C-alpha cells in the first residue's frame, strides 16, 4: 500500500495515538506498538506490521488497523499445499530405496 493510500485509510478510520492503541491492544507501553509498526512481529515465518502514519513527531494508527493487525497475528497458519510434510525418517528411507534402485540400474548397464 502506498503512503497516500495508507494516510487516507488511517485518517478515514479515525486516528488513534499509540498510547490509546496500546491500551486497546492490551499492552502497557506505546513503544511496543511503535516497534510493531517499524519491525513487525514474526509468526510462522511471516512478518506482520501494524499500519501507522507519522504526523510530525507523533505516530498515529486507527482502531481498525489495530484490529486487523491482531486478527492477522491470530489467524491459523496456512497449511502446506499438497500432501502433508514428509518426516525425515520417511525421507531417508525413500532416499535409500532410490539410491539402491539407481545402483542396480548402473550395475546392469
Image (cartoon, grey):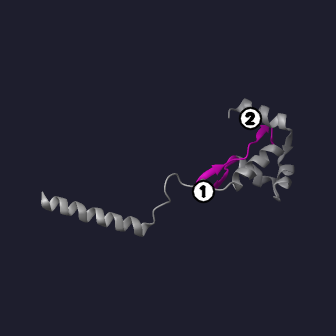
Specify whether 99 is left or right of 72: left
Q: Position of residue 24 (x, y in %)?
A: 85, 53
Residue drawn at x 54%, y 54% as measured from the top left: 80
Specify whether 77 is left or right of 92: right
Q: Which mark is residue 82?
A: none
Residue lying furthest top: 4
106 or 3: nearer the eye? 106
Alpha carbon separation for disc pair 1 and 2: 25 Å
Quarter of the picture containing the C terminus is bottom left
Q: Work out whether 71 lies above or below 11.
A: below
Residue drawn at x 19%, y 63% as measured from the top left: 104
Highlighted magenta segment, given as a residue range: 38-61
What residue did someone put label 2 on? 6
In reply to whether residue 55 is colored magenta, the answer given is: yes
Specify whether 12 is left or right of 83: right
Q: Are marks 1 and 2 in contact (CB under 8 Å)?
A: no
If you read the primary sequence from the N terminus, does the residue marked by circle 1 or circle 2 appear first?
2
What residue did someone put label 1 on? 44
41 or 56: nearer the eye? 41
Element at label 1? loop
Amino acid at each position: 500500500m502506498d503512503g497516500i493510500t495508507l494516510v487516507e485509510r488511517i485518517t478515514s478510520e479515525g486516528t488513534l495515538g499509540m498510547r490509546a492503541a496500546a491500551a486497546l491492544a492490551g499492552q502497557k507501553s506505546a513503544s511496543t506498538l511503535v516497534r510493531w509498526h517499524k519491525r513487525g512481529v514474526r509468526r510462522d515465518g511471516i512478518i506482520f506490521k501494524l499500519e501507522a502514519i507519522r504526523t510530525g513527531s507523533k505516530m498515529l494508527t486507527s482502531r481498525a488497523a489495530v484490529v486487523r493487525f491482531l486478527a492477522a497475528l491470530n489467524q491459523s497458519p496456512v497449511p502446506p499445499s499438497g500432501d502433508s510434510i514428509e518426516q525425515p525418517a520417511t525421507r531417508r528411507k525413500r532416499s535409500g530405496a532410490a539410491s539402491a534402485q539407481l545402483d542396480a540400474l548402473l550395475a546392469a548397464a
